[in-house]
Amino acid sequence: MSKKLVVAMSTSGLDYYPDTRNIRILRLNITVGTETFIDGETLKADSFENWLLKNPTGVVKTSPPLDSMLTRFFMKIADDGYDEVLVITMSSVLSKTYEYVKQLIPVFADKLRIHVFDSKTGTFAEGLMALEAEQCFNKGMDMESTIMRLRKMRQNNKVMFAVSDLRYLINNGRLSQTAGFFCQCVEY
């Protein structure tokens, strides 16, 4: 029987969940102004929020972990005795992390079977999928059945959010200037 592990991204919100059990967190890089930090390690949420309030027009970018960081991350998992890992990533449309991890599958083929699941979402919906996957493994479900369960969750997932200010979304390129203009013109 294989020893399985779930990996979620720092975008999953699991840093704020009281019991992440045995889920490892793969952390994004966040570039704030001219400095680059590791999400949740060298840059905490409260510091980031304070920076955004003081720099409302500041540009913030995220990027996947460097190849060397990803290699160390998965080597540690293999060294800890796991032979199969399910990595649940934020939407591959929003981050290249899915692609980067996929490229490591053949590199680790003799040490660790890496499965990558595109949540096609972000935020805590990712975290819920990771918690579900961990629960599936605890029940003895195999990888294929677990991924099928996650596909059903993903299919039924709807995330809605509201923001009071669109500047951040426009500044980091997630929302075009034109769309931002029209969104700001709509009154409810």
Image: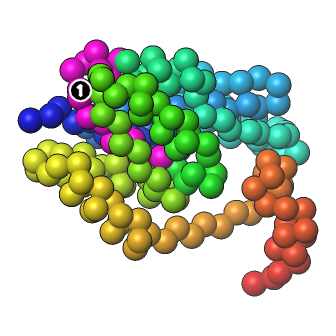
Q: Please say whether residue 39 is visible from this viewpoint.
A: no
How many numbered discs, if any? 1
* Residues in magenta, as a range: 76-89
Which of the 4 image quadrants contains residue 80?
A: top left
Q: Is residue 63 above or below residue 173?
A: above
Along the viewing direction, whichever of 174 and 41 lies nearer the viewer: 174
Q: What residue is pinned by disc 1?
A: 82
- Element type at marker 1? loop
Q: Quadrant of the C terminus?
A: bottom right
Picture quadrant where residue 174 is located: bottom right
Magenta-span inclusion, residue 82:
yes
Q: Check the image and name the residue furthest to the bottom.
A: 188
User: x, y percentage for residue 183?
Assistant: 82, 73
Q: Residue at x 44, y 38 (%)?
A: 15
Q: Is residue 128 left or right of residue 34?
A: left
Question: Three-letter amino acid code at disc 1?
Answer: Tyr
x and y, in percent, of residue 149 in the image: 27, 62
